[in-house]
Amino acid sequence: MTTRTIQMTLDSTLLDEVDVATRELDMTRSALIRSALAEYLLQVRLRRLERQDREAYDRCPATDADAEFWEALQDWAAPRGMGMSAGFSRRTVPAVGRR
């Protein structure tokens, strides 16, 4: 990974909090800010994916038949590793959302 140097402006209170956190976590300012930005951007991506999922379900909501199909596959008493996927073939998966 190539790194580039940037210049940032932070208000004094935020910078003081960054300095406290860096001492507590034994990190540099750069490492803390990189980590915080990576976490923030991950959350942004997850919110975008969740929004896309909601929009897709709004466009093509699941039916009661879809729910009944998936509920029938659940086997709560099955031993570990032998649950829903045991004996499950691709041919049995419904075309959810297709009418």
Image: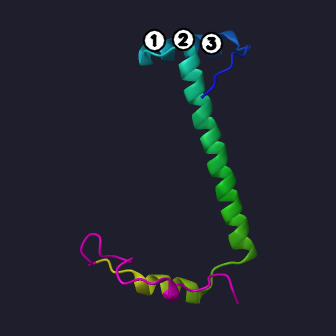
| Residue under the image location 66 percent in, 44 percent down | 44
Whether pointer 1 and pointer 3 mark residues with C-beta atoms closer than 8 Å, the reply is no
Whether pointer 1 and pointer 2 mark residues with C-beta atoms closer than 8 Å, the reply is yes
The residue at which mark 2 appears reads as 19
Amino acid type for the residue under numbered disc 3 = Leu
Can you see residue 97? yes
Which disc, if any, is residue 15? 3
Residue 95 highlighted magenta (yes or no): yes
The residues tagged by marks 1 and 2 sit, at their Cα atoms, a distance apart of 6 Å
The residue at which mark 1 appears reads as 23
Using a 10 Å C-alpha cutoff, classify the residue at mark 3 as few (fewer than 14 neighbours), some (14 to 19) or many (20 or more). few
Residue 93 percent coordinates (x, y): 53, 84
| Residue under the image location 56 percent in, 14 percent down | 29
Residue 6 percent coordinates (x, y): 72, 16
| Residue under the image location 59 percent in, 25 percent down | 34
Colour option used: rainbow
SS under mark 1? helix
Which disc, if any, is residue 32? none
Residue 37 percent coordinates (x, y): 62, 30
The residues tagged by marks 1 and 3 sit, at their Cα atoms, a distance apart of 12 Å
| Residue under the image location 57 percent in, 86 percent down | 94
Position of residue 52 in the picture relative to residue 85 (left or right): right
State which tag comes first along the sequence, 1 or 3: 3
**Main secondary structure found in the magenta portion:** loop
SS under mark 3? helix
Q: Quadrant of the C terminus?
A: bottom right
Q: Quadrant of residue 10?
A: top right
| Region rendered in magenta | 77-99
Q: Is residue 34 above or below residue 92?
A: above
Whether pointer 3 and pointer 2 mark residues with C-beta atoms closer than 8 Å, the reply is yes
Residue found at the very far left of the displayed protein: 79
